Amino acid sequence: MKRFVQILTVLILFSLAGMGQETQENLEAKRKKLDGEIAYTNKLLEETRSNKNNTLNELKLLNVKISKRGDLIATLKTQLHGIDKQIEETEITLKTLEENLDDLKVKYAKVAWHAYKYSSSYNKLVFLFSADDLNQAYQRMRYLDQIADFIRKEAKTIKQKEAEKTELLNKLNVERSTKKKLLGNEQNEVIKIEDEKSEKNRLTTKLQSQENKLRRTLRQKEKEVARLDKKIQDIIAAETAPKKNSTTGKSYELTPEEKTLSASFSGNRGKLPWPVERGVISETYGVHKHPVLKKVKTKNNGVDIATSARSEARAVYKGKVVSITKISNSNIAVIIKHGEYFTVYSNLDKVYVKKGDVVDIKEAIGQIHTNLKGETELHFEVWKSMTKQNPAYWISKK
């Protein structure tokens, strides 16, 4: 019974170790993704800094990098915790296996010694002929055969257990090596995030000396946001207004095709591709404190996505272009209808589509504007009829 419990314990621990390994693989994939996003954010920062003028966008990107660095450190801590658990489980499994192996070796030694006493032909014959009768002699013969068979099986089992022990020791060494590497990575990331926070404080102080300029820029942006919001609402109101059928006189809103498209769009919530091939969200949806100006709040009706110069905006889903609107000299907005849903792509300086075009998923619709400061940023919105949506809930997290 004791041996059965030991074996069951080993099997359970092996199973748990396997589950831990799967988690570690997921965490490693997340860590690599964050590494890539941080590297790309660094690239965008370099493009912005080439202008040699500190900008609000630079501060936003620095905040993005600090946030992602924090996520990376948290991921490394979770990985380390998982590795510690794996090491602990491997050590317990190894100890159980060693106890099991020692027990097997003791039993094997006893049986082997007993078998050795009858290993010569003479001893075997003496053992057999000393039987009281023929039946006992036959039983003794079977006993000797069973001992020989038991010895062979136990020797094979011991060999297998020794191999398992070697494998576990190697696994333990790998886990300890991985832990050492992760600890080094974590320490490096902690140093980097402290440097980045110092840089953020320096940049914030420098930008605070440009308060008047920042307020003028903010007012100009707020006007553009208001113009875009008004245009979006007008377009959506026109597109969603009940229409009359000239033949029957009955009114309707969505055609069967539009209802199907709406359901399909809705069914892809959280799985839509990004409206750029590569980028980082520099400002999220909703109301935010201004990163520099005190007691000032800004509102974002969508998300702003920082990307590389000459990047293109692309449709996140198939649909129909219902509007191409010039918000300013360097800001053109494209609105695409997906049944009762609408997506908005703003801050374009070149447009590849025209009103009425039917576009496919990931189709390029225009080039994103890069300003004189080297900043390239797409503004992206999602609406359901007249209701604004948080785009972060719709686009893929991967």
Image (spheres, helix red, strand yellow):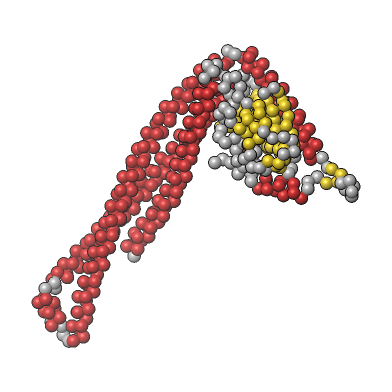
Residue 165 seen from this side: yes
Please state, as top left, top right, bottom left or bottom right, where the N terminus lies in the image. bottom left
State the image coordinates of residue 242 (x, y, percent, origin top left).
Answer: 83, 42
Give 348 or 88, whichever is nearer the viewer: 348
State the image coordinates of residue 199 (x, y, percent, origin top left).
Answer: 49, 21
Residue drawn where x is 33% and y is 48% of the image: 171
Q: Height in image: 171 above or below 1?
A: above
Give 37 or 138, whichever is nearer the viewer: 37
Residue drawn where x is 60% and y is 44% of the image: 271
The part of the image, by quadrant, that contains residue 337 is top right
Task: Name the side, left or right, on which 295 lies relative to 20.
Answer: right
Residue drawn where x is 26% and y is 67% of the image: 153
Residue drawn where x is 65% and y is 35% of the image: 365
Task: Name the side, left or right, on which 56 lies relative to 133.
Answer: right
Residue 70 seen from this side: no
Please state, as top left, top right, bottom left or bottom right, where the C terminus lies in the image. top right
State the image coordinates of residue 386 (x, y, percent, origin top left).
Answer: 75, 37
Give 305 or 178, whichever is nearer the viewer: 305
The part of the image, by quadrant, that contains residue 355 is top right
Task: Name the side, left or right, on which 171 lies relative to 142.
Answer: right
The part of the image, by quadrant, that contains residue 296 is top right
Q: Height in image: 139 above or below 390?
A: below
Across the whole image, how many numbered discs are drawn on residues?
0
State the image coordinates of residue 152 (x, y, percent, origin top left).
Answer: 23, 68
Give 227 or 85, whichever is nearer the viewer: 227
